[in-house]
Image (cartoon, rainbow, N blue to C red):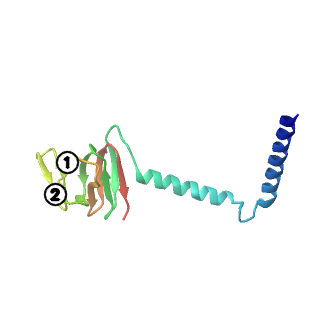
Amino acid sequence: MKKVFFTLSFFAVLVFAIIAKGAINDPGSEADPLVTKSYVDSVAEDLKNYFEGKVQKADKFVVVNLNSGDILIGDMGTEIILRSGNGIVYSQQGQGISDITDGRDLRKGEKILPNHLLIIPRDDNRGIQAKTGLVLMVKGSYQILKK
């Protein structure tokens, strides 16, 4: 009999807590705000743009356009070919990227030649900075930092 009484008391307290919580957070209050559809659509669009601009992964070469000042950061093993425009090697720590066509390392700030196959050797924020608008072919994971 004590078990039944205890169980019923527990459920009564639980139901009371749920009702009290519902009374405290009225819909539209500061604790439970209402939002408009346009606000939700705006946030969804912002998130979509954020994720599309942040991280891309390609199993084949894709064409990527950069505006002047934009930076493409590649993950380890990302392959890049400059098709048009002027770009330089970008690195936060001074290391470079591998120019497979010439068989040498391009250092930070060095001009990138068109139609050379470049490979990002490590995941430490290396890539290409656009001095003018660039057209690149990219294979692998990358992110674009907008100017």
Checking the image for residue 115, the label placed there is 1
**Residue 43 percent coordinates (x, y):** 58, 58
Q: Residue furthest left?
A: 103
Q: Nearer the viewer, residue 76 or 118?
A: 76
Q: Dot 2 surroundings within 10 Å: few (below 14), some, or many (20 or more)?
A: some
Q: Is residue 101 left or right of residue 81?
A: left
Which residue type does callout 2 highlight?
A: Arg
**Residue 44 percent coordinates (x, y):** 57, 54
Q: Is residue 86 visible?
A: no
Question: Which element carries disc 2, helix, strand or loop?
Answer: loop
Q: Is residue 131 visible?
A: yes
Front label number (2 vs 1):
2
**Residue 143 percent coordinates (x, y):** 36, 52
Which residue type does callout 1 highlight?
A: Asn
Vertical placement of 36 versus 14: above or below? Answer: below
Q: Is residue 50 left or right of residue 117?
A: right
Question: Which element carries disc 1, helix, strand or loop?
Answer: loop
Q: Mark 2 or mark 1: name the one nearer the start of the chain.
A: 2
Q: Tell me how far mark 2 sits from mark 1, CA to CA.
A: 18 Å
Residue wearing tag 2: 107
Residue in view at x 33 percent, y 38 percent: 60
Quadrant showing the N terminus: top right
Q: Is residue 101 left or right of residue 62?
A: left
Quadrant showing the C terminus: bottom left
Q: Quadrant of residue 32?
A: bottom right
Q: Nearer the viewer, residue 44 or 92?
A: 92
